[in-house]
Image: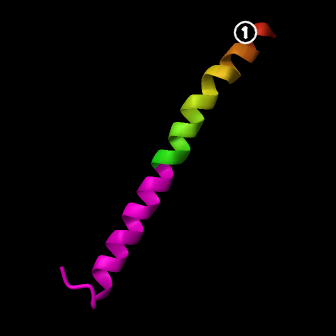
């Protein structure tokens, strides 16, 4: 891979955004059961 050009940097930035989306979605999935239990109590 040639790191001097702009493409690899863009690909790394894209993968970085994908990692953030995975982390955020994972956190939401972990929080969602607690939210559903609160809705059931109401």
Quadrant (top left, top right, bottom left, bottom right) of the N terminus: bottom left
Left or right, 13 with reference to 36: left
Magenta stretch, residue numbers: 1-21
Left or right, 16 with reference to 41: left
Residue 6: give x, y in percent of width and height.
Answer: 32, 86
Residue 3: give x, y in percent of width and height.
Answer: 26, 85
Residue that sits furthest to the left in the current view: 1
Residue that sits furthest to the top in the current view: 41
Residue 13: image quadrant is: bottom left
How crowded pointer 1 is (Cα within 10 Å; few <14, some 14-19, many 20+) is rated as: few
Report the residue at 55% width, 31% height from top: 29
Instruction: Name the secondary structure under disc 1.
Output: helix
The residue pinned by badge 1 equals 40
Report the residue at 72% width, 9% height from top: 40
Would you say residue 37 sits in the magenta stretch?
no
Q: Compared with residue 34, is residue 10 higher up or lower down, i.e. above or below?
A: below
Total marks shown come to 1
Q: Compared with residue 22, is residue 18 higher up or lower down, i.e. above or below?
A: below
Q: Compared with residue 20, is residue 36 higher up or lower down, i.e. above or below?
A: above
Report the residue at 42% width, 56% height from top: 18
Residue 9: give x, y in percent of width and height.
Answer: 35, 79
Would you say residue 14 sits in the magenta stretch?
yes
Residue that sits furthest to the bottom in the current view: 4
Residue 28: image quadrant is: top right
Quadrant (top left, top right, bottom left, bottom right) of the C terminus: top right
Q: Compared with residue 24, is residue 29 higher up or lower down, i.e. above or below?
A: above
Residue 21: give x, y in percent of width and height.
Answer: 49, 51
Name the chief secondary structure element in magenta: helix
């Amino acid at each position: 891979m040639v790191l001097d050009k702009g493409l690899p940097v863009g690909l790394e930035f894209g993968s970085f955004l994908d990692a953030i989306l995975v982390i955020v979605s994972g956190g939401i999935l972990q929080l969602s059961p607690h939210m559903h239990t609160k809705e059931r109590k109401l």
